[in-house]
Image (cartoon, rainbow, N blue to C red):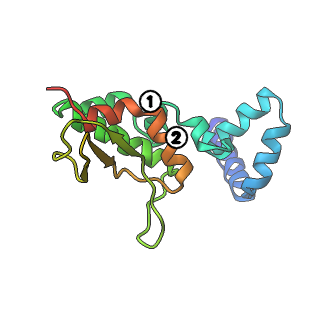
Amino acid sequence: MQGRHFLRSTVNLSTQLKNKMENLTISKENAIKAFEGANEKGRTLLRNLFGEKVFVKDIMERIDSLKAALEYNGKTQERFDWETERDSEARKAEKAIEEIATALREGKPLEMDQRWYYPYFERNTGSSVSFSYYGFGYDDDDADVGARRSVDTPEKAVYMGKKFIEYYNKMLAPTR
């Protein structure tokens, strides 16, 4: 009988504790202030409670590779590789740029009534007919190419075009 009484007491105590628990609401601003003033153990605790995304001031500092973009978007490199294993190098690069753009937008979708920005490239090709825009002069041809994997600020578009140029090269000028 003692065992049953102990079990029943434990369950009652546990139920009482659950009923007395309260939610604590902390604003993002206060969490960031606490993070900035905390030592490394405190920062680790806050990252574990609220997630890394809350404490990154500039998303461009955080997204410095495809792997970082995938992690930010909740994906793994293995998953991305599996999703793109049958794609051409150009298509794989296009999907990488999509992941990077999504991360740089911090997961927010672009709305039709807002401005969108994307990197814009100029490439001297000898013949610009294969691109969406072409111009010609008497002594040279060039092509201006805009990749439409958009972000929400011009600074992010410039960053994306410079930092991830290898993906744009694979997408816009694939090798055969």
Q: Nearer the viewer, mark 2 or mark 1?
A: 2
On screen, 17 above or below 126? below
Q: Is residue 62 above or below residue 27?
A: above
Looking at the rendered image, the quarter that the N terminus falls into is: top right
Asked whether, in this view, residue 169 is left or right of residue 101, the answer is: left
Q: Nearer the viewer, residue 6 or 21?
A: 21
State the residue in front, 34 or 139. 139
Quadrant for the C terminus in the image? top left
Q: Residue at x 40, y 37 (%)?
A: 75
- Along the line of sight, which residue is nearer the eye, 105 or 175? 175
Counting residues from the start of the chain, the first of labels 2 and 1 encountered is 1
Q: Residues within 10 Å of mark 2 (few under 14, many from 20)?
A: some
Q: For mark 1, what is the residue?
A: 67
Rendered image: mark on residue 159: 2
Q: Please report the residue visible at 72 percent of the width from the left and 48 percent of the height from the top.
A: 13
User: Could you tell me how far apart the alpha carbons at marks 2 and 1 are, in whole angstroms?
Assistant: 16 Å
Name the residue type under label 2. Tyr
Q: Position of residue 126 (x, y in %)?
A: 21, 36
Q: Amino acid at mark 1?
A: Lys
x%, y% of residue 174?
A: 21, 31
Count all numbered tags in the image, as a single digit: 2
Q: Is residue 153 left or right of residue 23?
A: left
Q: Tell me which corner region of the image, top left, top right, bottom left or bottom right, holds residue 59.
A: top right
